[in-house]
Amino acid sequence: WNAGMTAVGASSYVSIATAVAYTMPFVGAYLADALMGDFFAILFGAIALYLPGLILIMLSTVPYLLGDTFNKAAMSFGLLLLWPTGTGVVKSIVNVFGAKQFHPLLQSSLIESYYVNFYMCINIGALIGGIVVP
């Protein structure tokens, strides 16, 4: 029970998903700044795009749940559109949203500390992810 893809085909899917995820922060920034605000843009990206994408990818791996054969269309929609779009939308907003929880003048040292800790966690997570999932 698999997509019947070659290693090169599967790698292409991952590369396209990564490209979409790194392009979508522009959309997230526009949603947050011009249309929805930070909170609702993060909520929209996470609940309407990211989670449904992950759920579709997960459901496409359960044999016979979405049909008699592997549902490549569901996996493709989740992997190439929903999941990376949600990732990109949230990616551009979440760090600034966290910093906005501090007063810009009274807690400026805490903002600096927040950014240091935020990016330290991101980089440690990327390092561990690269070791665990080569």
Image (spheres, helix red, strand yellow):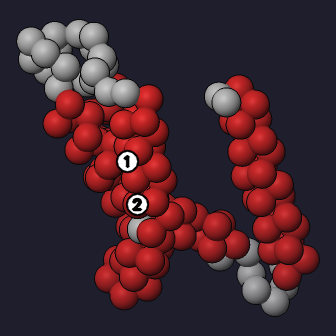
What kind of residue is marked 2? Answer: Val
What secondary structure is found at the residue carrying circle 2?
A: helix
Residue type at tag 1: Trp
**Do the residues bearing badges 1 and 2 touch, measured as CB atoms within 8 Å?**
no
Q: Residue at x 44, y 77 (%)?
A: 26
Q: Can residue 50 be seen in this view?
A: no
Q: Position of residue 130 (x, y in %)?
A: 71, 37
Which residue is located at x 85 percent, y 74 percent? 112
Query: 73 or 97, which lies in front?
Result: 73
Q: Tell me where residue 36 appears, x and y as whole percent.
A: 35, 77
Left-right relation of 82 to 70: right
Task: Check residue 20 in the rendering and tell me which mark sits there, or answer none.
Answer: 2
Above/below status of 68 relative to 18: above
Residue 101, percent from left and from top: 67, 71
Q: Relative to 4, is 43 above or below?
A: below
Crowding around mark 1 (Cα neighbors within 10 Å: few <14, some 14 to 19, many 20+) is many
Look at 39% across and 82% down and name the residue there: 30
Q: Quadrant of residue 45?
A: bottom left
Question: Whole-percent x and y of residue 100?
Answer: 65, 76
Q: From the viewer's perspective, is 14 left or right of 92?
A: left
**Is residue 17 something that shows in the picture?**
yes
Q: What element carries label 1?
A: helix
Observer-nearest of 57 and 69: 69
Quadrant of residue 86 within the rendered picture: bottom left
Q: Residue 83 carries which label?
A: 1
> How crowded is the residue under tag 2: few (<14 C-alpha within 10 Å), some, or many (20+)?
many
Task: Count every numbered label the image shows and give the total.
Answer: 2
- Image quarter hosting the N terminus: top left
- State which mark lies toward you, 1 or 2: 2
Q: In which quarter of the image is residue 120?
A: bottom right
